[in-house]
Amino acid sequence: MTMRILYFFLASALVLSMHSCTPPDRTEYVKQIDSISNALENVAGSYEKLNLNELQAKVDTVNMHLDFIQANYEGDMKKSIAFELTDYRSIRKIIPEFGKRRENIANGLTVSREQLTSLKKALSENATHDAVGNEINDEYLKKQIQQEKTINSALVKEIEFIVQKSDSINNRFARHYNQVKFWCDSIAASSK
């Protein structure tokens, strides 16, 4: 009988020690990270297909044309010309601070991708502490995932804005460029 009791205690201790070594199930956290990552990559793909240098060149061309006309146009401007130039000028305002936004998106994509990858790797390797020594527990994971959701939600909205507005810039530029270039060329020719 004592052998049975001893066997029972040994078996119980073995089960308890095995249970305490079993890493917690964190598949739900991995799913949340994948969801955040997928939402980001879905919009990042269309953003990264944009020719951002060409878009910036169009905005720069608009500025150059308008500066040239303002500096060199003499006399009263016809209303038809003024109206077209007003619409052309609005291209500059479609994406305010385009260069700064572009840089922020590039940095945001790099950091978010690294953060999400690191967090997912830590979970897959059953890490117990992060790089700075914080314990990776449920509270930590909930906080980190919420932080990533917030940051990536803002980043996704910013990327969607740029993608949507790039079409407006391209369309408006295509509609007015030839006429405005003709006026600039005419002004330059008449000043010779």
Image (cartoon, grey):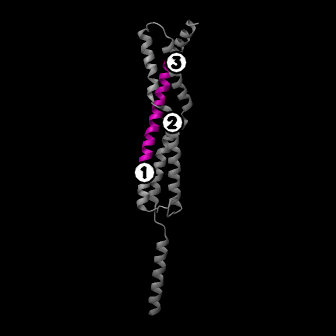
Residue at x 43% of width, y 13% of height: 82
x and y percentages locating residue 138 in the rendered image: 42, 61
Q: Which residue is mark 2?
A: 102
Residue type at mark 3 is His
In the displayed structure, would residue 183 be above or below residue 126? above
CB of mark 3 within 8 Å of CB of mark 1?
no
Q: Residues within 10 Å of mark 1 (few under 14, many from 20)?
A: few
Q: Quadrant of residue 186?
A: top right
- The secondary structure type at the circle numbered 3 is helix
Amino acid on which disc 1 is placed: Gln
Q: Amino acid at mark 2?
A: Arg
Distance from Cα at disc 3 to Cα at disc 2? 23 Å
Identify the residue under disc 1: 147
Which residue shows up at 48% across the image and 30% down it?
A: 166
12 and 118: which one is in front? 118
* Dots 2, 1 in contact, CB < 8 A: no
Please check the rendered image and state whether residue 168 is part of the magenta-colored stretch, yes or no. yes
Please name whichever residue, 133 or 186, is drawn nearer the observer in this view of the structure.
Answer: 133
Q: Please, is residue 133 above or below residue 75 in the view?
A: below
Q: Secondary structure at mark 1?
A: helix
Q: Position of residue 128 (x, y in %)?
A: 49, 64
List x then y, in percent, for residue 24.
46, 66
Image coordinates for residue 55, horizontal then vertical, percent: 53, 28
**Residue drawn at (52%, 60%) of the image:** 124
Range of residues picked out in magenta = 149-176
Circle number at residue 65: 3
Q: Is residue 51 visible?
A: no
| 90 w.r.t. 12: above or below | above
Give the camera-side residue of 186 and 162.
186
Marks 3 and 1 sit apart, C-alpha to C-alpha, by: 44 Å
